[in-house]
Image: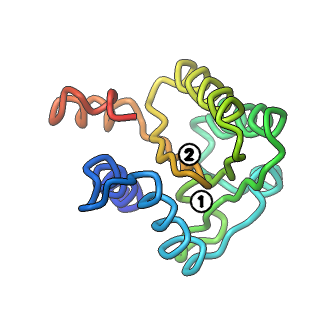
Amino acid sequence: MRWIVCVCLVLALSAGGCGTRDMQETADRHVRRDMLARHDKSEALSFLAQHGRFYDVNNDTHVDQEIVVPLLKRLKEIAHTEQWAMLKPENKKMAYGMLIGLPNDMKVVDKMAEAVQEADDKFEGFILQQWGHEWLLIALINKETYETMKQADPDFDKQR
């Protein structure tokens, strides 16, 4: 839960600008300085194939295999970029976010955004998205957390 709050805070700060006009650069700086430089990572699809966990903390849900893996594969078809599972420091078999490299071609990035939206539409919760120039960070929140966040901020899901 702590990682969800951290990701939400970063998303909110990125949306607010943090005093800079380029929110996407702020998001990329967060990825470079706070994630890639400080946390272990694993290739995303391999991590999930080897029973690493992202959303699914137990065998009660199958979101990793039903939503996340197809999304990552689709994004890889659209643009063959890096995809990393960002590992929790306290449990290397769990990821707190999926990091996807973005190509320079904005038309391709738009196709990637459509694929993420399609996956979000299939998921009963919400796919949090932090879009930079270089990186897309996604995290998933369950339906209850999503509803709570919408109650606190009715425009929460419009801040993409």
10 Å neighbourhood of mark 2: few (<14), some, or many (≥20)?
A: many
Q: Nearer the viewer, residue 19 or 81?
A: 19
Q: Amino acid at mark 1?
A: Ala
Q: Amino acid at mark 2?
A: Tyr
| Residue displayed at 50% across by 76% down | 33
Secondary structure at numbered mark 2: loop
Residue 135, position as x, y percentages in the image: 60, 54
Q: Position of residue 30 (x, y in %)?
A: 46, 66
Q: Earlier in the sequence, mark 1 or mark 2?
A: 2
Residue sitting nearer the eye, 81 or 151: 81
Is residue 120 or residue 159 the one in the foreground?
A: 159
Circle 1 Cα neighbour tier, 10 Å, few/some/many (<14 / 14–19 / ≥20): many
User: Residue 95 — which label?
Assistant: 1
Residue underneath mark 2: 55
Could you tell whether 49 is left or right of 157 in the image? right
Q: Is residue 53 above or below residue 87?
A: above
